[in-house]
Image (tube, coloured by chain):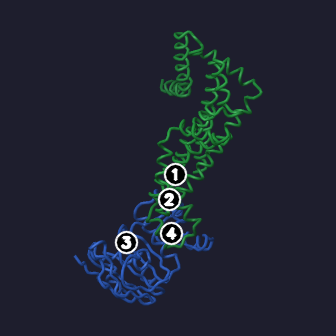
Chain colours: A green, B blue
Amino acid sequence: MRASTISLKKILRIARPALVLLFWLSVWELLALAVGNSYFLPSVFETLSALGVIIRKEYFWGSVLMTLLRVCAGLVLGIISGALLAFLCNRFSAVNAVVSPLISVIKATPVATFIVLLWIFLSGNQLTILIAFLMVLPIVWQNLSDGLRTISRELTEAADVFELSRKRRIRLIYFPTLVSYLFPAIVTSIGLAWKSEVAAEIIAYTKNSIGQHINDSKYFMDTPSVFAWTVVVVLISILFERGARALLSRWSK
Amino acid sequence: MIKLKNVTKAYGKRKILDNFSYTFADSGLYVVVGESGAGKTTLLRIIAGLDKAFTGRITEGIRVSYAFQEHRLFDTLSALENVSLVSFPEPNAKTEAKARELLISLGLTEEELSLRPKELSGGMKQRVSIARALLREAPILILDEPTKELDRQNSELILSLIEKESEKRTVILVTHDSRALSLPAAKIIKIKNLH
């Protein structure tokens, strides 16, 4: 009796994500049936069929790859710059006084405003990378600034007394503290960078990008394709975030 | 030799040390006593160069070793690694062997050597912190309440080690442990509470 209860629980635990997915797909399908017009809301099957079509297009993987590369470029730039600025702000109060208001402005400015403003000066590629960068920078800066404020003074004093090298201070004091602030910032940044990147691609009609194809599909009133491309965006975002999570947790150990 | 001349330290308007002068010889055991809040730890911090916001003069550039009251062990290192990290510039096999021997002599077991601070009891952490300070080769050894979390047997062991150490270098000890005051080598420094 006990063994069967345990195995049932185990099966339910494994099957639960699939059941949840099935539930939401059913809701979608029912809504699509109720609307009854694929221009407004395509059904699950229409979307999957459109997905089958776009995956077979020769430009599909190239566009996905280019979008992914631009997100990565924006992410890397944002993480490096955010980290550098956080260290400089922590070290020099004058730098902090200058940088803090700028970060507040970046955080408060709607992403669409940035896209429209920067589109005047920059090419599609540069624009989308810069947009991803601008989304990542404040998150990394804020989290690392908070982390740096919590660095134990007691341990840095112990490091002074025992004349520990800079490398060992980083490994023993800074890294363990900052990791718990940096890693969540990276994971949050990935989702945000990805979303803002695609938004910028759509508005700026960036060549060889997912955004370009979403824009085209919308132009040709091909709503199932818009949904199919959105499914691609969501799936890659989830995979990207999970991959990063796994990599970061392995690295932190 | 380390000299303090007219050292005055205040936190805001509250004076902790007022024109404190003292000369510590190259070796010997100095036991600093006084009421809580009298400035004993402040004095140790000034000697160690951790507190520079004071007036007066002190011999500069002397390396110290310090067993902090709060242990201050590194969470990501084992007990053994915490002790052997004092070797300069990087831990080596010789220091690790010495650290192992010292920790075992202070009552830690082989298994406990690989435990991280989070897994150690207060008394164990204290012994690791003392071992780290003892292992570091510096002319001045500072110990802040080294027997605070130890039982009678371990306290006596630590005090005898400290006394032995004071034959080779200057040992400055802050304690409320009356046994430390009765050590034959102990020179008592009384810090008056200014409030």
Kindly report which numbered mark, 2 or 3, lies closer to the viewer in this rendering. Answer: 2
| Chain of the residue displaying label 4 | A
- State the separation of the CA atoms marked 1 and 4: 26 Å
As drawn, the residue found furthest toward the right would be: A58
Circle number at residue A141? 1
According to the image, label 3 marks what residue? B147
Q: Which is more N-terminal, label 1 or label 2? A: 2
Q: Are marks 2 and 1 in contact (CB under 8 Å)?
A: yes
Residue on which disc 2 sits:
A89
**Residue located beneath label 4 in the image:** A159
Question: Disc count in the image?
Answer: 4
Q: Tell me the element at label 1.
A: helix
Asked if both marks, 2 and 3, belong to the same chain, the answer given is: no
Query: Numbered disc 3: what chain?
Result: B
Q: Amino acid at mark 1?
A: Trp
Q: How many residues crowd around disc 3 within 10 Å: few (fewer than 14), some, or many (20 or more)?
A: many
Q: Nearer the viewer, mark 4 or mark 3?
A: 4
Q: What amino acid does circle 2 point to?
A: Cys
Left or right, B171 with respect to A199, comes to left
